[in-house]
Image (spheres, rainbow, N blue to C red):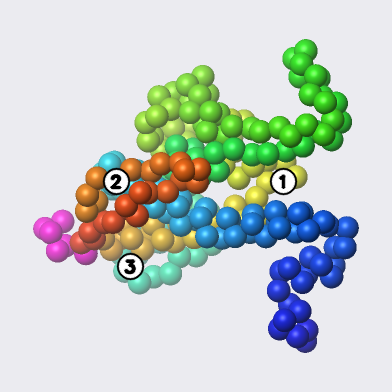
Amino acid sequence: MADEKDSDLIWYYLKNDPSMSMQNICDAIIGFVFAALFNTQNSIALAIYFLGQCPKAIQQLREEFKHKMNDTDTTTKLTWDDYKNMEFCQSVINETLRLGNIVPRLWRKALSDINYKGYIIPQGTTIMTHIGAMHLDPSAFENPNIFDPWRWLAIKKSNNWFPFGGGVRHCLGSEIARIQITVFLCHLILNYNWELVGPDHPVASPLVQFPKGLPITIHPLGSSGQ
């Protein structure tokens, strides 16, 4: 077993990939920190925020969770088959990521000269794709500023939806992130209702976050006559 001091991420890069520059190593580690600390928790916060304004979606989620788990006992654990068959929950996650824009832009470098619609992008140019502009494009999504998870019941695949990137650079953690969000929503919605303590809304500065931390009050189901 390797010494503990030799088993961290920085040491792995230094030892196993000497071709990486210190800048590359720093970029990679910052990327891991960003993905681990911000993406999933912010996605869950955004889901709570959007769903809190859409009681119809909460009710449909609650019905789907109960049906797919085939049990009204909320202590029952989710299975992989449950997760894969929760179509509306996946639609809620898709819409949360589209409207929330956790990752508002992506950076890439042109590996060769690119001719795009008559414009020459020289090799080595850094290219920034504005994901937020794609996700809020009315030509791609009808009423793009409206939280509408039902739109995804008809959209099986979209070339204008890139919260996890795409191609060979598609986020390796995309599936685990979706699972974490699903499990959290399942336990929250089967057991509680909630409401915002006070006005709060997501802002990008540059990462999406809530200025007040999105404080909420939760009520166990049945405690408010529901």
Choose mark 3 or mark 2, whichever is in front: 2
| Front-most of residues 9 and 160 | 9
Identify the residue at image location x=38%, y=34%: 148
**Disc with the residue nearer the chain's start (1 vs 2):** 1
**Disc with the residue nearer the chain's start (3 vs 1):** 3
How crowded pointer 3 is (Cα within 10 Å; few <14, some 14-19, many 20+) is rated as some
User: Which residue is farthest front?
Assistant: 22
User: Which residue is farthest left?
Assistant: 225
Residue 69 is covered by the magenta coloring: no
Amino acid type at image mark 1: Arg
> In the rendered image, which residue does mark 3 sit on?
74
> In the rendered image, which residue does mark 2 sit on?
200
Visible residue check, residue 41: yes
| Front-most of residues 149 and 127 | 127
**Disc with the residue nearer the chain's start (3 vs 2):** 3
Alpha carbon distance from label 3 to label 1:
37 Å
The image position of residue 222, as x and y in percent, is 16, 62
Q: Which mark is residue 169?
A: 1
Visible residue check, residue 47: no
Among the 4 quarters of the image, the one containing residue 119: top right
Identify the residue at image location x=47%, y=21%: 138
Choose mark 3 or mark 1, whichever is in front: 1
Identify the residue at image location x=34%, y=55%: 213
**Which segment did they paint magenta?**
220-226
Among the 4 quarters of the image, the one containing residue 120: top right
Among the 4 quarters of the image, the one containing residue 204: top left
* Badge 1 vs badge 2, beta-carbon distance below 8 Å: no
Alpha carbon distance from label 3 to label 2:
30 Å
